[in-house]
Amino acid sequence: MKRVVAVVGASGFVGSAVAEHLAVEYEVRRLVAPRLQVQATSISDLRAAVDLAAVDAYAEQYLVGVNLVVNAAGLATATATHLPALLGANAVLPLFLAEAAHRAQADSYVHVSSAAVQGRGLLTESEDMRPENPYAVSKALGEVLLRRYSPITTVRYRPTSVHGTSRPITRSLVKVARSPVAVVAGPGDDPSPQMPIARLAEAVALVGAEAGSAPEVVLHPWEGATTETVMSVLGGKDPKQLPRTIARSAVAGAYATARIRKGLLGHARRLDMLLFGQEQAAGWLASRLGPRPSAQAWLKSLADAMSASDQEELD
């Protein structure tokens, strides 16, 4: 008998890819996440916002007989600022689903978090979290709630910047790469934590299969891209190289502006990533995932698919 996996948020960008990948080996239940909005911000109040009667009802209706629950739901917009919706989807929902999975007697639970919880420093599998915008704060609070209160074997999986043809942030990145403002901090060899959606789905399947022996936090490994690779392959041309001192001044100015106008924090972070990328420590998944495709190959495939999509829209 096939193992049964429930994928919550299966209609979304991440969830649909995960569900499709898992369906090759498992019986997959594609589920919709309950919509939660909360005003609370303290850990105790957020925990209290988990409605146990609603948890019981969700478990009984959707999760009976499930072996593994994957939470691929949430608000994944780094520039979002509406805190009640962010906290409901990214902080309270993860614990809600952990409680529901436990009550349905599932074996384990994989929560798709985000590397954004660690801010601008070296990405690791540690509990050191320094979120810098409302989105990242909400994801970090979700991790804290799971670490403290999850009643079931739980793995918090942190993907980095995920790309696919249907994702708005990917389209924005391609537009920048093809524009006159395509720049990197010279010489452009900084590691960039970009990844294709197919690798996320592969990682979630592996983490779910080994949830009992995996660490509580799993970081997606570096997929081999550099800042120059991303811009040149997606843009079809070499990006301009800014002197690093000028690039750092530009990033510092963006963060300074964002401290005054909080809604710009996500945009400042994107500029920082575009120019300087971000380093990652090797973690648990690094030696377990299958051989990664070359960064040039998956970025070229993505660029070609985006060009074909744009042409179809014109036709």
Image (tube, rainbow, N blue to C red):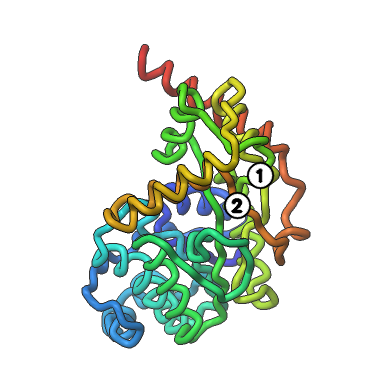
Using the image as rendered, state which of residue 31 and residue 207 is in the foreground. Answer: 207
Quadrant of residue 175 in the image? Answer: top left
Of the pair 215 and 213, the residue shown nearer to us: 215
Rendered view: 232 above or below 39: above
Taking the spot 34% from the left edge, 59% from the top edge, the residue there is: 32
Pointer 2 with pointer 1, Cβ within 8 A: yes
x, y percent for residue 197: 55, 45
Graded by Cα atoms within 10 Å as few (under 14), some (14 to 19) or many (20 or more), the crowding at tag 1 reads: many
Marks 2/1: CA–CA distance: 7 Å
Q: List x then y, in percent, for residue 156.
A: 54, 70
Q: Residue visible at 42% across and 84% down?
A: 103
Helix or strand or loop: what does disc 2 sit on?
Answer: loop
Residue lying at 36% horizontally and 71% vertically, measured from the top left: 93
User: Residue 242's image quarter?
Assistant: top right
| Circle 2 residue | 278
Q: Earlier in the sequence, mark 2 or mark 1?
A: 1
Q: Residue furthest top?
A: 315
Q: Amino acid at mark 2?
A: Gln
Any part of residue 91 in sight: yes
Q: Is residue 242 left or right of residue 141?
A: right
Residue type at numbered disc 1: Asp
Residue 190's tag is: 1
